[in-house]
Image (spheres, rainbow, N blue to C red):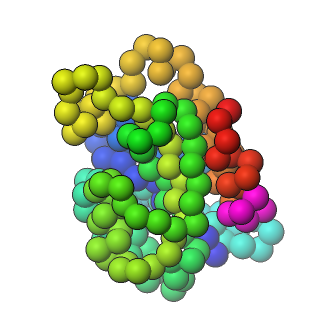
Amino acid sequence: MKLIVGLGNPGKRYQATRHNVGFLVIDELARQNRIALDEERCGALVGEWRCGGTLLVLAKPQSFMNRSGMAVKDLLDHYQVTADDLVVVFDDLDLPFGRIRIRPRGGAAGHRGILSIQEHLPDAPFCRVRVGIGRPPEGMEATDYVLEPFNAAEQDGLREVIERAAASVECILDEGVERAMNRFNRAP
């Protein structure tokens, strides 16, 4: 069993913001696999399917970003799996727009959603798929930047970025983290 969680903020106001890249990737995986994310479980919208006998669960926590950890922990408990079976997809300010960086474990680098997960799963190694959103312009606070919609130039490439991030998750599931890192951690 694998649990794939995309981090974001619920509600229309945040739907198309940089901070919701994780949700966008989960939506793309759901679209590609014809999965409805319409069941609420453990504080998250979830969709399930089987692939080669393995249960795969997509999830979008419905608490705000900085409280995502409780839903993730509750989902792991519900499905009776460990963090080794968890893949988390989220935005990253420290990567240029469109870059993808996969890591089998690591720190939060100030990301509040990851900090929340680490609070609820201390010392638990889980796979991370970081999707670059770039740095804010000079004089803009990071908290404001992540809650803004993508600009026109980013919008032009966003579909490709989301599809590539979704492909990286599928590669993790099909071929393992190491192969996915080798394939997707390079610049496109």
Residue at image position (57%, 60%) is 103
Which residue occupies the extreme front position in the image?
138
Residue at left offset 29%, top offset 23%: 137
The reply, left or right, for residue 2 in relation to residue 92 is right
Which quadrant of the view contains residue 165? top right
Residue 37 higher or lower than 27, as above or below:
below
Q: Residue lying farthest top?
A: 152
105 or 24: nearer the viewer: 105
Which quarter of the rendered picture does the N terminus lie within?
A: bottom right
- Give how far across and how far down residue 99 sits, in percent: 56, 37
Name the residue at 42% across, 32% down.
134
Q: Which residues are magenta?
A: 174-179
Q: Is residue 53 above or below residue 93?
A: below
Place residue 143 in its image quadrant. top left
Q: Tell me: residue 96, above or below residue 114.
A: above
Where residue 182 sits: x, y (%)?
A: 73, 52
Q: Is residue 82 magenta?
A: no
Left or right of 186 on screen, residue 91: left
| Residue 179, horizontal then vertical, whole percent | 76, 58
Side of 118 where 140 appears, left or right = left
Q: Nearer the viewer, residue 130 or 45?
A: 130
> Of residues 143 and 32, which is closer to you in this image?
143
